[in-house]
Image (tube, grey):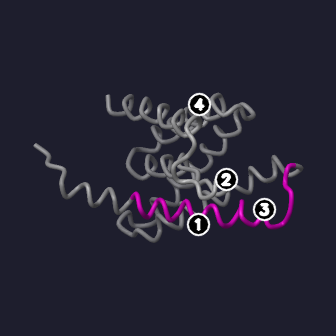
Amino acid sequence: MKYFLLTILSIIFIYFISTIPPFFSIDGVVQPDLIIILVIFVCFNFNEIFSYLFSFIIGFFCDAILGTYLGFHSSVYLIISYFTSRFGNLFYKEKFFNKLLLVLISDIFYRIILLVINFQKSKSIITIFVFVFIIPFYTVFLYFLFHYLKKFLKKFYVTR
């Protein structure tokens, strides 16, 4: 049941990100990819099979909702999920810096693949630099904020 609920909430999350102007964007230009944060969160907290299936389904819905090439986000999120599951097990789960590094590498990988696909739309070196290097650091910063928000909310969460 929790897997089904997570998938439904993620699809609603994708729809929310694609239709409402993003709350976390800076000046409408720098917009982090919150789906990568969600995929990495699922990779760290669930088993490998579910994380692969989840990233493929979420990528498929991203392709369908955002109107990109069918299979682009599915394959990229599946590759990110695979490497996060493989390399995430090599690190200690308690080491927060390792998670930040995996988020950064995953987002840079996603941005480079997106840049290769859409190379002809690139305007200048500055936009490429912002797209490939500045936005992933902003995504890492948001992951950092979400992590500490999660720790803060755990203090008030009472289990029975």
Earlier residue among tags 3 and 2: 2
Q: Which residue is mark 2?
A: 110
Q: Which residue is mark 3?
A: 127
Marks 1 & 4, CB-CB < 8 Å contact: no
Q: Determine crowd level at label 2: few under 14, some 14-19, many 20+ residues with C-alpha closer than 10 A.
A: many
Q: CA distance from mark 1 to mark 4?
A: 25 Å
Residue at image position (52%, 40%) is: 52
Tag nearer the camera, 1 or 2: 1
**Quadrant including the N terminus:** top left
| Residue range of the region highlighted in magenta in the rendering | 121-146
Residue drawn at point x = 50 percent, y = 36 percent:
54
Q: Quadrant of residue 78?
A: top right
Q: How far from the left and from the top, in percent, is residue 99?
A: 46, 64
Residue occupying the point 72% across, 60% down: 131
Q: Which residue is mark 1?
A: 137
Alpha-carbon span between mark 3 and mark 4: 27 Å
Asked if the residue at tag 2 contacts the one at tag 4, i.e. Cβ–Cβ closer than 8 Å, the answer is no
Q: Nearer the viewer, mark 3 or mark 4?
A: 3
Q: Earlier in the sequence, mark 1 or mark 2?
A: 2
Image location of residue 67, percent across then percent down: 71, 31
Tags 3 and 1 touching, CB below 8 Å: no
How far apart marks 3 and 2 lie (CA) works out to: 16 Å
Q: Amino acid at mark 4?
A: Phe
> Which callout, 3 or 4, points at the residue further toward the start of the chain?
4
Q: How far is disc 1 from disc 2 in space, using C-alphas?
A: 13 Å
Q: CA distance from mark 3 to mark 1?
A: 15 Å
Magenta run includes residue 138: yes
For marks 4 and 2, give the CA distance.
17 Å
Instruction: Determine crowd level at label 4: few under 14, some 14-19, many 20+ residues with C-alpha closer than 10 A.
Output: many
Mark nearer the viewer, 1 or 4? 1
Question: Mark 1: which amino acid?
Answer: Phe
Image: 83 above or below 14: below
